[in-house]
């Protein structure tokens, strides 16, 4: 149990560092557009979470981790949003709306934020699926 | 999943077989994620060109002359065509294409194949249209490379959309065959 608490504290610190980098990339250059990156990465796991339980109640669907249309749609939209999060600062920097350093900092910060979300959900999913069922994940 | 007898297939044409990448049960998931990423990347590439065009005031080195060419609706058309083809291909029921007449009548299979053809024709038309726009609008008037980039972005958008739909198709089809093998 102590290990999981340590994990949670570590992930929270990484999340805070990620947000700090994004906010710094806004503050240092006086342009608050990179803050959109934080919003995009926070919203990224939402489609997956919304569509995760569509179609997993069926008998046949539980083989492939819920191989159904809505689940695929959720994954597709999540991948789209994550790619948008990386592409937005690059496009803004290319059009010289934001500084290049702000672009790199916001991408790093966004990657930290999204990585934290992924690691957190993965850690908790493991603890749940030890008891329930091995097939569905 | 690969049986040892699969290593030599008498129907094989090429000397080297296609690499059989076996991601196991995560193949469908990985394919769908990759397709979504490519889809977003395609549209961001073109949006990048549009934003650059909206901000571009002058050619390099000549700050007083206005930009000779901008992204207009003509540049948007191939991408829109490809997007429509993307929708059409993904709306098709994939079990119809396989054409097992015991499940469905032959006319439905014929119609599904027709729609698949229309979808791929739309995507290929988008691809060809973007190359046409490159030649007619940018190469023949001999604009600078700064402006040819708009059209290169459009071509990359169409290529990425095509790649995305192919990956999505393979990912969604292969898993059903896998499941079919598993249940038998």
Image (cartoon, coloured by chain):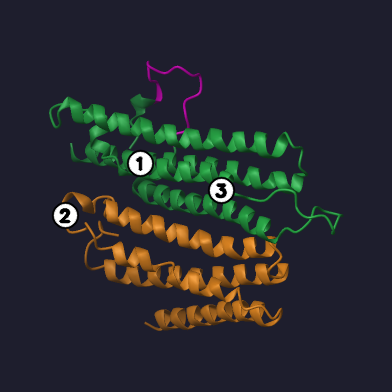
Q: Nearer the viewer, mark 1 or mark 3?
A: 3
Write the start and end of the magenta stretch as one range: B7-20
What residue would you read off at disc 2?
A: A58
Question: Residues at marks 2 and 3, common chain?
Answer: no
Q: CA distance from mark 1 to mark 3?
A: 22 Å
Camera sees residue B22: no
Q: Position of residue B146 (x, y in %)?
A: 75, 49
Q: Position of residue B66 (x, y in %)?
A: 78, 55
Which of A46/B124 is in front?
Answer: B124
Q: Most prominent secondary structure in the magenta stretch?
A: loop
Q: Is residue B103 left or right of residue A96?
A: left
Q: Nearer the viewer, mark 2 or mark 3?
A: 3
Q: Residue at x 61, y 81 (%)?
A: A23
Q: Is residue A89 left or right of residue B92?
A: right
Element assignment for label 1: helix
Q: Is residue B14 magenta?
A: yes
What residue would you read off at disc 1?
A: B88
Q: CA distance from mark 2 to mark 1?
A: 27 Å
The quarter of the displayed image where residue B181 is located: top left
The colour applied to the residues of chain A in this rendering is orange
Q: CA distance from mark 2 to mark 3?
A: 46 Å
Which of A112/B83 is in front?
Answer: B83
Q: Is residue B161 left or right of residue A46?
A: right
What residue would you read off at disc 3?
A: B73
Q: Residue at x 42, y 61 (%)?
A: A78
Q: Residue at x 21, y 56 (%)?
A: A55
Q: Is residue B177 above or below residue B8?
A: below
Which chain is represented by green in the image? B
Q: Is residue B135 above or below residue A68?
A: above
Q: Position of residue B55 (x, y in %)?
A: 69, 61
């Amino acid at each position: 149990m102590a290990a999981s608490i340590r994990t949670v504290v570590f992930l929270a610190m990484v999340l805070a560092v990620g947000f700090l980098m994004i906010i710094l990339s806004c503050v240092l250059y006086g342009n608050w557009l990179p803050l959109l990156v934080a919003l995009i990465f926070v919203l990224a796991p939402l489609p997956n979470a919304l569509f995760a339980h569509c179609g997993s109640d069926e008998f046949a669907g539980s083989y492939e981790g819920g191989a159904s249309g809505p689940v695929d749609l959720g994954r597709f939209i999540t991948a789209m949003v994550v790619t948008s999060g990386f592409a937005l600062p690059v496009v803004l920097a290319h059009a010289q709306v934001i500084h290049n350093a702000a672009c790199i900092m916001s991408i790093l910060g966004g990657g930290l934020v999204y990585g934290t979300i992924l690691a957190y959900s993965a850690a908790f999913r493991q603890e749940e699926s030890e008891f329930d069922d091995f097939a569905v994940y | 999943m690969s049986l040892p007898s699969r290593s030599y297939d008498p129907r094989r044409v090429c000397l080297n077989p296609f690499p059989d990448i076996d991601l196991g049960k995560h193949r469908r998931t990985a394919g769908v994620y990759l397709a979504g990423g490519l889809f977003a990347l395609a549209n961001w590439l073109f949006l990048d060109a549009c934003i650059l065009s909206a901000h571009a005031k002058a050619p390099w080195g000549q700050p007083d002359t206005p930009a000779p060419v901008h992204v207009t609706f003509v540049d948007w058309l191939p991408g829109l065509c490809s997007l429509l083809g993307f929708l059409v291909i993904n709306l098709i029921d994939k079990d119809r294409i396989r054409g097992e007449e015991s499940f469905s009548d032959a006319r439905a299979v014929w119609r599904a194949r027709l729609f698949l053809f229309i979808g791929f024709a739309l995507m290929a038309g988008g691809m060809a249209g973007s190359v046409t726009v490159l030649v007619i609008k940018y190469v023949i008037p001999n604009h600078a490379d700064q402006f040819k980039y708009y059209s290169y972005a459009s071509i990359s958008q169409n290529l990425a959309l095509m790649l995305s739909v192919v990956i999505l198709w393979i990912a969604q089809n292969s898993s059903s065959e896998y499941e079919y093998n598993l249940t038998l």
